[in-house]
Amino acid sequence: MHTWLLPEAIEDLLPDEAAQIETLRRRLLDEFARHGYQLVMPPLLEFADALLDENASDLNLSSFKLVDQLSGRTLVLRADITPQAARIDAHLLNRVGVTRLCYCGSVLHTRPAGLLATREPLQIGIELYGHAGLEADHEVIRLLARTLRLAELPPSRIDLGHVGIFRALVAGQGLAPEVEQRLFEALQAKDLPTLRELTATLPEPVRNGLLALPTLFGGDEVIRGASVCLPMLPEITRALGELQRLAVELADLPLSFDLADLRGYHYHNGVVFAAYCADSPAAVALGGRYDAIGARFGRARPATGFSLDLRTLMRLAQPKPMPGAILAPWPEDGQAQAEIERLRAQGEIVVAALPGHAGSWREAGCDRRLVRRGEEWIIEPLGES
């Protein structure tokens, strides 16, 4: 086996890609900071019993695990930074009021999420803790739209759903966990034959409500349709009211509604959303409310947020030409060094020409060169072929 090969769905970022991602990372983190989101940097490695919830089967399956040689305990390489941010809010910051956090870092997945997906997403996101009102969901969804516009990938649509509707329909039905999981999967796939089979023994109007969910997607008419065909349980009435309010308050965004979209069902408990761009059939960002996640760290707090993968954004965005560098003669005197530093202070990339490499500087990104004509320094096109 070639020693330079990488594992499947793991890849290097070469200079142009890395520069594009780093530029985008800085732009987005600066924007988050302007909205009051403070940067945190959780570790890549944690104890498994701290990071993994036994009820979150998806996260368990996607996480790499190993044994700590110091403690003998099982460690996990993070597959999602959201639980780490919740731990920081609940256990380390321990603030009374609203906390806004942002983060950016690599996560590792045992399997890629899709055919062309990486197993090492570069996850960036925000989390807002401490406010249970819909104003927090409003802020996060609007900032998500702003984030995609800054990445020059304006959202073509943002699908909104509400986990509370499904939870209200199955509550008290005595469903075994594996049956509830199969119902969840069938709804996600909009698999009506399987749904009919799984709901055959459920009472009306619960059965009709579950069968209606896969058909409830589209514009805000979905909310009106849902109020007709779903049982008006208090939880469902409240959920539809929240979606209707967001439809009005965020009318300038390309909102749509999908009441069968339950991604993150195991820890989300309210409004959930997925953003799409014109050139991607898959969602480029996911988010929603997850008020209960902090309980396992000793302090349940209202929470909502979103995350996305910078690698995905980089590949969808139009590639930007990288600025060319100036090749400077090796600074054998103070005047040459001063001119090099002056150019760098102006924002130019200046590469010092190490001796013995003539003819190879274009591959290092140089397209101009600095030369001295008498007492004057000038920049001219690089003559290498």
Image (cartoon, grey):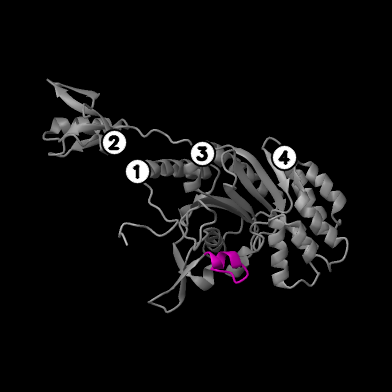
Q: Nearer the viewer, mark 2 or mark 3?
A: 2
- Is residue 191 rendered to the left or right of residue 95? right
Label 1 vs 2, first from the N-terminus: 1
Q: Which residue is mark 2?
A: 365
Q: Earlier in the sequence, mark 1 or mark 3?
A: 1
Of circles 1 and 3, the one toward us is 1
Q: Secondary structure at mark 4?
A: helix
Q: Is residue 193 magenta?
A: no
Instruction: Give the label, 4 or 1, closer to the camera.
Output: 1
Q: Amino acid at mark 1?
A: Pro
Q: Earlier in the sequence, mark 2 or mark 3?
A: 3
Question: Which percent across, then down, holds residue 246?
Answer: 72, 44
Give the CA distance from mark 4 to mark 1: 42 Å
Q: Nearer the viewer, residue 4 or 236?
A: 4
Distance, label 4 to label 3, CA atoms, is: 24 Å
Residue sitting at 60 percent across and 39 percent down? 155
Q: In the shown orientation, is residue 342 left or right of residue 233? A: left
Q: Please check the rendered image and state whether residue 59 is part of the magenta-colored stretch, yes or no.
A: yes
On residue 15, the disc is: 1
Residue at the spot of label 3: 151
Q: Is residue 8 visible?
A: yes
Residue for badge 4? 249
The span shown in magenta is: 52-62
Is label 4 in contact with label 3 (beta carbons under 8 Å)?
Answer: no
